[in-house]
Image (tube, helix red, strand yellow):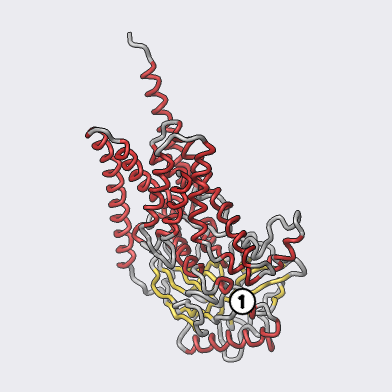
Amino acid sequence: MRVAAAAVSGLVLALAGPPFDFTIGVWLGLAGFAFVLGSARARFADALAVGTAFGFGANMLAVRFVPAVVARFTPLPYAAGVFALVLLAVGQGLAWGAGALAYEALARRRIPRAFAFATGIYVASFAPAVFPATAAGLASAWPVMVQLADVVGERGVAFVLALTAGLVAEAAIELVASRDRTQVRRALLPLVIAAALTVGVVLEGTSRIRAFAREGTTDTVRVALIAPAVPAEARWDPSRAEGVLELLTTLTREAEAQGAELTVWHETAYPYVVAASSRRCPMGEHAMLGAGVHGPVLAGAVFSAGPGDAYNAAAVCASKPVWGDILGAPYAKRRLLAFGEAVPFAEHAPWLRHVFARGLGLVPGDRNVILTAGAVRASALICFEDTLTGAGHDAMAGSPNLLVNITNDAWFEGSAETELHLRLSAMRAVETRRDFVRAVNVGPAAWIDATGRVRARSSGAPGDAPSFLMVTPTLRETPATLFARFGDTPTATGLLLALAAIGGANTLNARRRARPLD
């Protein structure tokens, strides 16, 4: 029964994501999870089962697009895709299981249940995942609730949300167990604390958003986000490369005619391979700056130094100071997508190479690169890197004044993944206090401001015609946020100190109670 209740709570959490957008489900789902964990003393094995069930329920709903992707882009049948979804849901559910184990360990040491639960959620957020998501990422639909991210990061915000939900669950546990008015009154305290914490977060968030609204926006740039809507199969068909490049050129020319100062092409948009050693844009019939295009263009492309040594990269191609120059070194994607760009365990199971052939031949980059175009100093996040809090932190190396994501979500056309991707990416803008633009092949192109609000977006609906979205993000030169400078270290350190202090106080109290009376 507890395992089933945990799975249902996970489903409620996932309802916060698109297309349901039941954002309050973040708190309801977490509170249900905390209630199940705290309502009975459990063995560690039971806690692991409850936590994994919660994660399983959440992932089965959140990444339900997996079977269709497997059936469409691999030789495997749809049933194999369903099996892959179940395996993925269990695998990613184990992260929540680890969080439940942390909760149980802390609760046994008399750490207050709500604090122990929030710590468990924080621990779970560090686990690697194919499709990473946290409660804070889902809650970003209400930007007022996530403004603390510039100090504590996405994981820290998830801790605060879980602490609130844990307090509500603690009150519910007391009410269920109450047999007299004293116990009922005892349940009011965690509710009052939860309400005060929520009000404090809302007031702080409102204040921060209003402060940004009062800022001047004179340092802006007109950016065109090209959305060619090229089908996934067509992008990798060499016979269609010429048509793809012609479409990109036409859309870029039209955008520049409307005043674009920078044009952004999506991930691997340029349909030919570029030599990794080149510092010149492709010219001639495969010119990146085609007929009538002046640049600069920030383009996604594959750069290769030879067989098995290719990079999923972003580079700026410009007409000034010299026509066709690549302005600076390209940025090579540092975190490769499992089964999309890298094949885990392929060296031990060679058959995986044949099933997931797209994942071969790419190698990760090893550093951040600032991409310069006029007044723009951009850091690029490629594909799912914009859902990773660590990638956002790394992107601030070099002090960019704009964040840019280039993505090809054509693999997930027609599913909720494209909207979920946008939802989760908003946290990068809040953590870094930089405006953030996203150029997406299939899915919503968008401009997210430094408070995490989506200021402009395309529809991203299946069947959209090729187009571009013109946006005017602010180029922010403000000092790096606490999170951008130090990442998760201050929050994790503060949490460890708080746990040590609570544990120490519990030990002293236990010794006092055990001391014999004189």
Examine the rendered structure and indicate whether residue 105 appears above or below residue 490. Answer: above
Tell me where residue 166 appears, x and y as whole percent. 37, 44
Tell me where residue 31 appears, x and y as whole percent. 38, 48
Residue at x 72% of width, y 74% of height: 275
Tell me where residue 28 appears, x and y as whole percent. 37, 52
Mark 1: secondary structure: helix
Q: Quadrant of the N terminus?
A: top left
Quarter where residue 345 is shown? bottom right
Quarter where residue 77 is shown? bottom right
339 to the left or right of 184: right
Quarter where residue 325 is shown? bottom right
| Residue lying at the far top of the rendered structure | 518
Q: Is residue 303 visible?
A: yes
Residue at x 55% of width, y 80% of height: 229
Residue at x 37% of width, y 53% of height: 27
In the image, 44 versus 262, the foreground residue is 44
303 to the left or right of 26: right
Label 1 Cα neighbours within 10 Å, binned few <14 / some 14-19 / many ≥20: some
| Residue lying at the far bottom of the rendered structure | 292
229 to the left or right of 2: right
Amino acid type, residue under disc 1 in the picture: Ala
> Exactly how many numbered labels are in the figure?
1
| Residue lying at the far front of the rendered structure | 1
Q: Quadrant of the C terminus?
A: top left
Tell me where residue 356 appears, x and y as whole percent. 69, 65
In the image, 153 versus 421, the foreground residue is 421
Residue at x 52% of width, y 43% of height: 49
Q: Which residue is mark 1?
A: 232
